[in-house]
Amino acid sequence: MTIADKLMIFAVIVGPILAVQVQKTIEAWKSGRERKIHIFRVLMATRGTPVTPNHVEALNLIDIEFSGNNKKEKSVRDAWKIYLNHLCEYPKDYQDPAYKSKVDIWTNKTSDCLVDMLYTMAQILGYDFDKVQLKKGAYTPQGFLDLESEQSLVRRGLLDVLYGKRGIPVIPFENLNRASPGKSENQIQSNKS
């Protein structure tokens, strides 16, 4: 058996194994990229409503999917850490006289942190977005914002009642019959007799 024959046997045995390994590597890379793109797409779609479960889930997947040791993926994780740290600093004392202004400042910075993170993700995923487009390009109906704000106020008020910080105002009705819609004064008098 010559060296050429041995090389041919080696190539016949090792060639398919290497081809399978290369194919698996390519598929793993594509799958990882698709998961990163999915996270980016969810965050882009929900950037106007960041308290939705889908948005929160996508944020929590960043550390898993952008876990590579390269500089680009580390920059996404760093932007996420800054954003997460800021989210944890939400003003909690809503009885503070400066609460409204603190929330406004916090909200503006929240938007900036999210935009910075999305911009970093867009750059490494090959999307061409500028920061203005990321910040101003989301559509959020005013009704969503109003609903979210009202639900928050109701929850806070209910918690105040439950924790004994506030009572439930009770207003007595002087004459319930007069409050009945559609009854005339004669009908009210006849009901009394």
Image: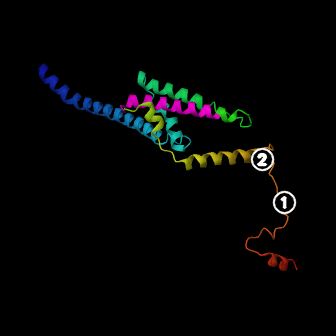
Please tell me whether residue 1 is drawn above or below residue 92 in the rendered image: above
In the rendered view, does 36 fall on the left or right side of 101? Answer: left
Q: Classify the position of the N terminus by image quarter.
A: top left
Picture coordinates of residue 25, whole percent (x, y) = 32, 31
Identify the image's colour scheme: rainbow, by chain, secondary structure or one colour.
Answer: rainbow
The residue that mark 2 highlights is 161
In the rendered view, does 189 fall on the left or right side of 158? Answer: right
40 and 152: which one is in front? 152
Disc 2 marks a residue whose amino acid type is Val
Picture coordinates of residue 101, whole percent (x, y) = 66, 33
In the rendered view, does 53 fall on the left or right side of 34? Answer: right
Reply yes or no: does residue 119 show up in magenta.
yes
**Residue 180 tag number:** none
Mark 2–mark 1 Cα distance, whole angstroms, equals 20 Å
Reply yes or no: does residue 123 show up in magenta.
yes
Predominant SS of the magenta segment: helix
Residue at screen point 64% across, 48% down: 151
Picture coordinates of residue 165, whole percent (x, y) = 80, 42
| Sequence order check, earlier mark of 2 and 1 | 2
Please tell me whether residue 123 is drawn above or below residue 169 in the rendered image: above
Picture coordinates of residue 181, whole percent (x, y) = 74, 70
Check disc 2: other Cα within 10 Å, few if <14, some if 14-19, many if 20+. few
Residue numbers of the magenta segment: 103-127
126 and 146: which one is in front? 146
Residue at screen point 37% across, 32% down: 128
The residue that mark 1 highlights is 172
